[in-house]
Image: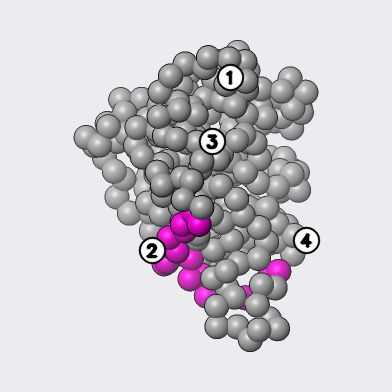
């Protein structure tokens, strides 16, 4: 299975891999095949998750299959170290390391208004606004960071921070862990919820609609996919989030499903806008 046709003209980069669970990482053979299926002229980004020692060794093998200029999105500082050891690869700080409040209790309309207080402004900022953290990223060679839509919106000056932002839409990770509900199904009671338990990657094919027992967030579309709970944001939230990233190099990545192995992206704002407006 390849990346499929892009959503239209102007979609110029292919994403492939797994950014939430190391069990979903491709084998070396699958990555080699996937890399060969990238259309001519399209750039390539490998998504990687947080990993344990075995996963780190596996990622090291995957990196050897990449080409000079390929990006690697990281959710683990050990993986970032491996990327830096491979000349020509471009590290990108993944969504899980670009920390900010992603709370599904925040109503979708919250970001439609400018921040009224300093507290509002803080809720619209991520870890990259910390000068100390930004200095660390600079030292580690990171020039691009990835984000997910948030209802409260963004209030960050990426041009001043000299960082290029990428927005993944429409799904945003809310919370996750090392054990997996899907992998536990069908297991003997004593083997349920084991860290690193084997699975058949059911989460690639199915998601579980997740409800709020207290009924405090009827607006939120929540799904459990594998080891992660995602919120699917309406396009107006994603649109406002992307509009706040109005800097050269800003990129939109469109995910068909929370854990879809393939995705397309664009840095053409008019192309991104058409998708966000539903007119692509």
Judging depth in this view, the residue of 126 and 67 nearest the camera is 126
Q: Residue furthest left?
A: 279
Tell me the element at label 3.
strand
Q: Mark 1 or mark 4, which is nearer to you?
A: 1
Q: Name the residue under label 3.
A: 147
Marks 3 and 2 close (CB-CB < 8 Å): no
Precedes in sequence: disc 1 or disc 2 = 2
Q: Mark 1 or mark 3, which is nearer to you?
A: 1
Tell me the element at label 2.
loop
Residue at x 62%, y 20% (from the top left corner): 119
Q: In this view, does 237 lie above or below 163?
A: below
Q: Mark 3 or mark 2, which is nearer to you?
A: 3
> Does 60 sit left or right of 145 as displayed?
right
How many residues crowd mark 3 within 10 Å: few (<14), some (14–19), many (20+)?
many
Q: Name the residue under label 1.
A: 121
Q: Name the residue under label 2.
A: 1
Marks 1 and 3 close (CB-CB < 8 Å): no
198 is within the stretch colored magenta? yes
Q: Which residue lies furthest to the bottom in this view?
A: 188
Which region shows up in magenta?
Answer: 195-213
**Residue 135 in view here:** no
- Give the CA distance from mark 4 to mark 2: 29 Å
Q: Mark 3 or mark 4, which is nearer to you?
A: 3
**What secondary structure do most residues of the magenta stretch adopt?**
loop
Precedes in sequence: disc 1 or disc 3 = 1
Residue at x 74%, y 32% (from the top left corner): 140
- Give the CA distance from mark 1 to mark 2: 43 Å
- Give the CA distance from mark 1 to mark 4: 38 Å
Judging depth in this view, the residue of 148 and 136 nearest the camera is 148
Precedes in sequence: disc 4 or disc 2 = 2
The mark found on residue 53 in the picture is 4
Residue at x 38%, y 58% (from the top left corner): 2
């Amino acid at each position: 299975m390849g990346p499929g046709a892009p959503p239209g003209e102007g979609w110029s980069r292919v994403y492939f891999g797994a950014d939430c669970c190391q069990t979903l990482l491709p084998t070396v053979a699958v990555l080699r095949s996937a890399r060969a299926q990238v259309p001519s002229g399209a750039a390539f980004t490998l998504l990687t998750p947080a990993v344990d020692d075995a996963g780190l060794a596996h990622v090291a093998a995957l990196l050897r299959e990449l080409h000079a200029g390929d990006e690697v999105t990281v959710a683990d500082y050990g993986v970032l170290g491996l990327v830096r050891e491979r000349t020509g690869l471009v590290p990108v700080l993944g969504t899980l390391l670009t920390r900010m409040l992603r709370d599904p209790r925040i109503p979708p309309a919250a970001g439609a208004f400018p921040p009224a207080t300093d507290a509002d402004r803080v809720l619209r900022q991520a870890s990259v606004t910390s000068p100390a953290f930004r200095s660390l990223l600079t030292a580690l060679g990171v020039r691009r960071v990835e984000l997910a839509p948030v209802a409260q919106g963004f209030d960050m000056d990426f041009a001043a921070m000299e960082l290029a932002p990428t927005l993944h839409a429409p799904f945003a990770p809310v919370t996750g862990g090392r054990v997996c509900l899907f992998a536990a199904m069908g297991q003997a009671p004593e083997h349920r919820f084991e860290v690193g338990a084997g699975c058949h990657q059911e989460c690639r094919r199915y998601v579980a609609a997740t409800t709020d027992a207290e009924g405090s967030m009827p607006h939120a579309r929540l799904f459990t996919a594998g080891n992660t709970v995602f919120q699917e944001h309406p396009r107006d939230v994603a649109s406002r989030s992307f509009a706040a990233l109005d800097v050269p190099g800003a990129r939109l990545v469109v995910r068909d499903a929370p854990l879809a192995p393939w995705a397309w992206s664009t840095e053409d704002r008019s192309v991104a806008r058409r998708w966000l407006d539903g007119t692509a």
